[in-house]
Image: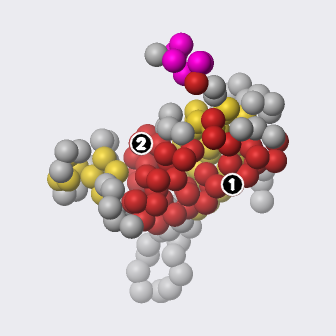
Amino acid sequence: MTQQRYAFQGYDPKKMARVLGVSLPVSSKVGYELCNHLRGKKIKQAYAILEKVIALEYAIPFRRYNMDLAHKTKIGPGSYPEKAAGYVLKLIKSAEANAQYKGLSVSDLVIIHICCHKASSPWRAGRQRRRKAKRAHFEIVAAELSEKSEKTKK
């Protein structure tokens, strides 16, 4: 297997923790919408959102890939991407563990970079239909930001 590279530029190992999910069985379109919703949020906030999505209590708004999606109250077209939320939740937990190992403050972690790229799409098994599998690569970078630096950016 070839080595995967990170798309994020400007990584500082002393202040940031990162994780890469390679070839996860998730649609890249669903991953795109989920990543856009979680970008810029604190780790604890992202946990709460993803657990509610898995429990079908919180819908993720779909802004770009929203053809034939049902309207949800207050957000417009949206969906409950349970499978993608489960995989992203595992990756966020891994990023938090990486940060804790580095000695970073877990309560101040903010997702500064999260992206989803389309991965290879091999043929599904079986002879009846010719279908391709949906896969995606996920990349998460979390940084330790203090309250003062967040206020100065706004």
Instruction: Assess disc 1: are there few (<14), some (14-19) or many (≥20) residues with their C-alpha within 10 Å of its C-alpha.
Output: some
| Numbered disc 1: secondary structure | helix
Q: Nearer the viewer, residue 143 or 65?
A: 143
Q: Nearer the viewer, residue 127 or 124?
A: 124
- Kind of residue at disc 1: Ser
Question: Which quadrant would residue 131 be assigned to in this image?
Answer: bottom left
Query: In the image, 34: left or right of 42?
Result: left
**Which of the labelled discs sits on residue 94, or is there none?**
1
Residue at (41%, 42%) from the top-left corner?
37
| Numbered disc 2: secondary structure | helix
Q: Nearer the viewer, residue 65 or 79?
A: 79
Residue at (74%, 43%) from the top-left corner?
99
Q: Which residue is mark 2?
A: 37
Residue 149 colored magenta?
yes
- Residues under labels 2 and 1: Cα distance? 19 Å
Question: Which quadrant would residue 17 be assigned to in this image?
Answer: top right
Q: What residue range appears in magenta?
A: 148-153
Q: Main secondary structure of the magenta part?
A: helix
Q: Is residue 74 above or below residue 12?
A: below
In this orientation, does residue 5 appear?
no
* Residue 30 position in % (x across, y down): 41, 54
- Kind of residue at disc 2: His
